[in-house]
């Protein structure tokens, strides 16, 4: 195994040569061959045996992943590759393609500068491919293209060399079209991939070979020869003549940026702090002698070492024994171990420097998405914007009461390692709620609690998380009185325009409006908000805004924090069904306050404002929003009727239908509430001969005819009386 040790030594030596480092991800639609590709890259670099590559799946070291044949955890690995006589350190993060694990993909993209997008030659660009490309470009990650499963075109579909090239041209032009649509302005048309310059490669990850134009020139192998080798079923020789790891890693080194290059344009996008400060400059220049700034993208639970925080060092260096802060947490954390990752192995080193991926233990307060620094009060990295949010919830109970304390501990740990899982522990009712991206996401988390942590649990049927909103502006201000009747607040609410909701969701408006008041006001005005409204903004909670449009009211400034607290409370749990609110603009239009500070404390102000906001929502045509999924189905023509019938039973709306060969591709949207059990239903309806996947696409109003019935069900489930309170209830 000498080669592996040799590589580890080389990797340590290359860590400081910034121009010779590449941090990359592999992203693709589910089952297009990402993990097989990662394994072959590792094998080629001597990190695992070549016979097993593609069969062993080193990066899928979780037994659950091997059983299901899908990648759930994003694992990372470093390897050394020689290109044009120079050695390069390549840090690779493998990402899941299944939509329920989209959060993992987004977090991995934050840590890398380039990515290989894998597209299957047979299926072509799929909806999920578009999602991962969007995630990459949103984080300013530069993509290159690998067209996989070329052998299947030749051996199964029996296409001619001419048809094969036509297919490639179609995939490449569709990919470039995507890039031009989604790329950041400064890179439009510059990041397009081209066969001629080697930013596209073709091959078969399973059979371990690939080609690109530069490599063809090097070896003299052309498409014609490749076609013949596949036709003769001699892919072994092909793999010897043009090994996949050589071709792909050459492409990575040649076309993807080094940290030194990438941090110049990426830091501006992922960090809001002062670019001229010492830390700002150090990150943009990727200096190892600057202050420490590290972004955690993943927490791995290790039975022996505890929590391992994996992330990207953007500035400075992280050392064994160093004292660091998790920004936003009060305590100092002491780093116990610093490691480089190689497959499932962690290799201890003394320190890891800027521009590299690190796996560290001892940073107890870290969760995926935290910023680690050597000073407590630096500006953290931008929060990671997830393309979808948790919309399905189950109640989790321990079978044996004695396991309860352990279960609560495990639920907390799980939500640390996977921020796409939300855990709510209700001390009063003893109910533990776990929310995730979809049924599969929750099933797998449930499996982990049982198997990895050995706790026997019972989960309820899945329930959907709704949102509350308003359909129109309040007809008049609603008055909320404090319990002592000495303070009155007047509130109006109205729907927040769609483009502003989107901007908050995409993190374009700073969450901390107190600190970035000017910036927030300007962005809101640019989005078309009235100047007075935009200037009065003093709170954002979820996708809702609180603004103050009063004039010269005495003592109001002192109660602002309390008003904000009441607003946050209502936005987390609205008046119609105790569900979170979304897309509401709350305006404080007037207030009458008692002279004496003692009569306008928290116990007076909070209930008054809370009632005023609740009341204002109830008189503004309150509506319930439900989560909607896009559903993509690819079915043989003769089964189309069965597939459509399955959709029609689920309030689905078919958006598009395309026929390709003897397959029909259906694109529809359906409410998440009606999609439970869809997986097994469609399998049995079509004898398993249909490919399908879903993607969350936000919230839409529940149809008017169903709204009262749904509200009643939610309220009864929560133990509330079936009808929401009328406005009068909030008046006194």
Image (cartoon, rainbow, N blue to C red):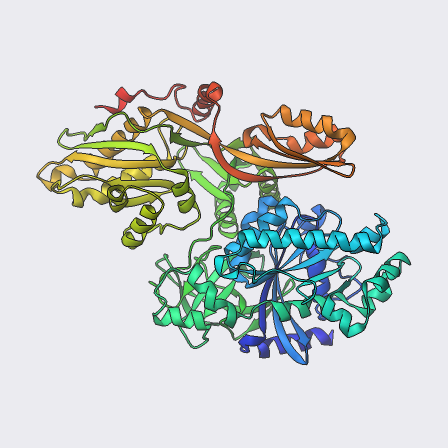
How many marks do you count on the picture?
0
Name the one closer to the observer, 386 or 186: 186
Write down the quadrant of residue 252 in the picture.
bottom right
Asked whether residue 316 appears in the rendered view, the answer is no
Can you say which quadrant of the picture contains the N terminus? bottom right
**Residue 137 coordinates in the image, percent (x, y):** 53, 56
Q: Is residue 388 left or right of residue 255?
A: left
Residue 691 seen in this snapshot = yes
| Residue 349 placement: quadrant | bottom right
x 69%, y 32%: residue: 680
The vertical placement of 452 against 80, above or below, is: above
x and y, in percent, of residue 149 in the image: 77, 54
- View extreme (bottom): residue: 85
- On the image, the x and y values in percent for residue 717 come to 46, 25
The image quarter containing residue 558 is: top left
Q: Is 357 in front, or is 273?
A: 273
In the rendered image, the residue lying farthest to the left is 595
Residue at left 41%, top 50%? Answer: 507
Instruction: Please determine whether, in this image, residue 187 is positioned above or below residue 133.
Output: below
Is 72 placed left or right of 497 in the picture?
right
Q: Residue at x 62, y 75 (%)?
A: 88
Between 717 and 679, which is closer to the camera in this rendering? 679
């Amino acid at each position: 195994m000498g080669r592996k040790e040799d590589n580890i030594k080389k990797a340590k030596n290359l860590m400081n040569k910034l121009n010779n480092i590449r941090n990359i991800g592999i992203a693709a639609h589910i089952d297009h061959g990402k993990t097989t590709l990662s394994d072959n890259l590792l094998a080629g670099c001597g990190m695992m045996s070549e016979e097993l590559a593609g069969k062993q799946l080193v990066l899928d070291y979780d037994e659950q992943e091997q059983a299901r044949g899908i990648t759930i955890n994003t694992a990372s690995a470093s390897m050394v590759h020689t290109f044009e006589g120079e050695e390069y350190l390549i840090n690779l993060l493998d990402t899941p393609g299944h939509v329920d694990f989209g959060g993992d993909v987004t977090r991995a993209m934050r840590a890398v500068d380039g990515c290989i997008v894998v597209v299957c030659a047979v299926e072509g660009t799929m909806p999920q491919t578009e999602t991962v490309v969007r995630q990459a470009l949103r984080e300013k990650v530069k993509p290159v293209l690998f067209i996989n499963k070329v052998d299947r075109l030749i051996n199964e579909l029996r296409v001619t060399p001419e048809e094969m090239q036509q297919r490639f041209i179609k995939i490449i032009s569709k990919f470039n079209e995507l890039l031009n649509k989604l790329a950041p302005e400064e890179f439009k048309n510059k990041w397009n991939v081209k066969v001629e310059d080697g930013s596209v490669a073709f091959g078969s990850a399973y059979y371990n070979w690939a080609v690109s134009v530069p490599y063809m020139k090097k070896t003299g192998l052309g498409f014609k020869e490749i076609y013949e080798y596949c036709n003769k079923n001699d892919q072994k020789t092909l793999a010897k003549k043009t090994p996949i790891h050589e071709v792909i890693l050459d492409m990575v080194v040649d076309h993807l940026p080094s940290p030194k290059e990438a941090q110049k344009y990426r830091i501006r996008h992922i960090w809001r702090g002062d670019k001229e400060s010492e830390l700002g400059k150090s990150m943009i220049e990727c200096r190892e002698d600057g202050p420490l700034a590290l972004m955690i993208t993943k927490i791995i639970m290790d039975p022996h070492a505890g929590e391992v925080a994996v992330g990207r060092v953007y500035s400075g260096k992280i050392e064994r024994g160093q004292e660091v802060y998790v920004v936003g947490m009060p305590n100092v954390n002491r780093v116990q171990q610093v490691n480089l990752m190689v497959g499932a192995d962690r290799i201890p080193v003394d320190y890891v420097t800027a521009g590299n991926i690190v796996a560290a233990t001892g940073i107890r307060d870290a969760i995926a998405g935290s910023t680690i620094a050597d000073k407590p009060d630096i500006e953290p990295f931008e929060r990671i914007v997830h393309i979808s949010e948790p919309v399905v919830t189950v109640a989790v109970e321990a079978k044996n009461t004695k396991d309860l304390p352990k279960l609560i501990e495990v639920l907390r740990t799980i939500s640390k390692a996977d921020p796409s899982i939300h855990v709510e522990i209700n001390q009063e009712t003893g109910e533990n709620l776990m929310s995730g991206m979809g049924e599969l996401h929750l099933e797998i988390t449930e499996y982990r609690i049982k198997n990895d942590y050995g706790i026997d649990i019972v989960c309820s049927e899945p329930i959907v998380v709704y949102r509350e909103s308003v359909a129109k502006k309040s007809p008049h201000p609603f008055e909320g009185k404090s319990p002592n009747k000495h303070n009155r607040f007047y509130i109006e609410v109205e729907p927040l325009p769609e483009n502003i909701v989107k901007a908050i969701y995409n993190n374009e408006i700073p969450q901390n409006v107190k600190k970035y008041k000017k910036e927030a006001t300007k962005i809101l005005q640019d989005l078309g908000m009235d100047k007075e409204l935009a200037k009065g903004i003093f709170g954002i909670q979820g996708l809702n805004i609180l603004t103050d449009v009063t004039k010269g009211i005495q003592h109001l400034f002192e109660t602002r924090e309390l008003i904000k607290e009441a607003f946050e409370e209502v936005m987390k749990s609205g008046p119609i069904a105790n569900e979170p609110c979304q897309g509401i603009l709350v305006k404080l239009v007037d207030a009458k306050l008692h002279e004496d500070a003692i009569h306008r404390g928290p116990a007076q102000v909070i209930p008054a404002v809370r009632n005023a906001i609740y009341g204002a929502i109830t008189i503004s045509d309150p509506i319930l929003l439900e989560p909607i999924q896009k559903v993509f189905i690819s079915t043989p023509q003769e089964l189309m009727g069965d597939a459509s019938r399955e959709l029609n039973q689920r309030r689905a709306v078919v958006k598009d239908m395309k026929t390709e060969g003897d397959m029909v591709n259906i694109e529809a949207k359906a409410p998440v509430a009606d999609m439970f059990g869809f997986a097994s239903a469609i399998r049995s309806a079509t004898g398993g001969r249909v490919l399908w996947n879903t993607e969350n696409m936000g919230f839409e109003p529940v149809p008017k005819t169903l709204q009262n019935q749904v509200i009643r069900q939610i309220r009864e489930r929560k133990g509330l009386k079936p009808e929401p309170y009328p406005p009068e209830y909030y008046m006194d």
